[in-house]
Amino acid sequence: MALSQQQTTLIIKLGAMGDFLLALGPFQSIRRAYPQDHLILWTTPAYARVAKLSGLFDEIWAIPRFSSWNMVRLLSWLRNIKRRGVDRIFDLQTSSHTSRYYYGLVLMGWRGDFSGIARGASWRHTRSERNSMHTMDRQKDQLMDAQVQSVPVPNLDFLVASGSRSLGAVEFSELIKNRGQPAYCLIVPGGSQHRPLKRWPVAQWKKICDQLIKRSICPVLIGGPDEKDLRGHFEEFGSGLIDLIGKTSLETLAWIGRSALGAIGNDTGAMHLLALSGCPTLSLFCTRESDPGLCAPRGDYTDVLFAPSLLEISETQVMEHLDALRERAQKKES
């Protein structure tokens, strides 16, 4: 009896960070549904390492996003997909751009299965309320329409394990050990530079740092390389805090978060990573900019404070919610 030919499944998920991390559960369920397939992920270079560490994929296409006007490059890549004999595509980006990828493939004669929102797709997600669903719930519903069941909450144990072996973890452990102050709380004061309303004022973050230090809890500043401008605002604390802005990989941050008393931050990708890593997280949302009902971090111990303007949120509210969150986590662990 002839052996059946291995099939090829392609997943499209481009970003941003929070959305990519929330898609790890769907990645895991697709792998379980097609264990023998050659599984390919099409993503952006920023998330290729996390995808590789997950061990879920046989191949990763780390490609910068195509400009809408660069049709020649896009069509060339779509021809490559057709040549590779991809049997099915799961579009977890579900944007108008990725739907156009489907239309382009069909015009080229591709006839595989497609899960997404594109008209004519074999597994089109048509639920009318999809745009009012949280990202995780929406993706779970989309995959159910494609006969992929039991979508789990993303498990970042693989990232925490990798982070434990990183140079950053060794250096951070030494920092904490030398301070003689093992308790620390992560502070994520940055966020999208082109959406300043999503950032709680620096003056408020400084009050939080002061409150933590008075409790003998070390504030640890977290942020990306493009947020180094924030450092100068916290210089007055000197050695009272640890500044890791622009100094941590995603896996190191996951490991640091696993042992933190908690994390407080703006609506930004790092908060999703920390929440999924098992860190008690309190996220601050400006509802004029984003809806926590659609994109708040998910995890075992998460909470959200939201208001039309972040100026309406006080440091007292933040500390009270952090205390309640930590108490909830401690009760569950005991």
Image (cartoon, helix red, strand yellow):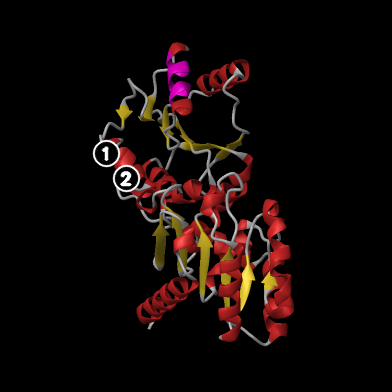
Q: Is residue 222 above or below residue 331?
A: above
Q: Which SS class for mark 1?
A: loop
Q: Quadrant of the N terminus?
A: top left
- Classify residue 160 by image quadrant: bottom right
Q: Report the span colored magenta.
A: 99-106
Q: Looking at the image, can residue 148 be seen?
A: no
User: Which residue is more in the foreground, 162 or 186?
Assistant: 186
Q: Which residue is mark 1?
A: 129
**Quadrant of the rendering where the C terminus is positioned:** bottom left
Give the quadrant of residue 260.
Answer: bottom right
Q: Is residue 70 visible?
A: yes
Q: Position of residue 71 (x, y in %)?
A: 58, 17
Instruction: Give the Cα distance between marks 1 and 2.
Output: 7 Å
Residue in front for this viewpoint, 7 or 316: 316
Residue type, mark 1 in image: Glu
Query: Which SS type dominates the magenta stretch?
Result: helix
Vertical side of 38 occupied by 25: above or below: below
Q: Residue 45: x percent and y percent?
A: 63, 41
The residue that mark 2 highlights is: 133
Residue located at (57% from left, 50% from top): 196
Residue at the far left: name it. 128
Q: Position of residue 10 (x, y in %)?
A: 47, 33
Asked if disc 1 and disc 2 are in contact, CB closer than 8 Å, the reply is yes
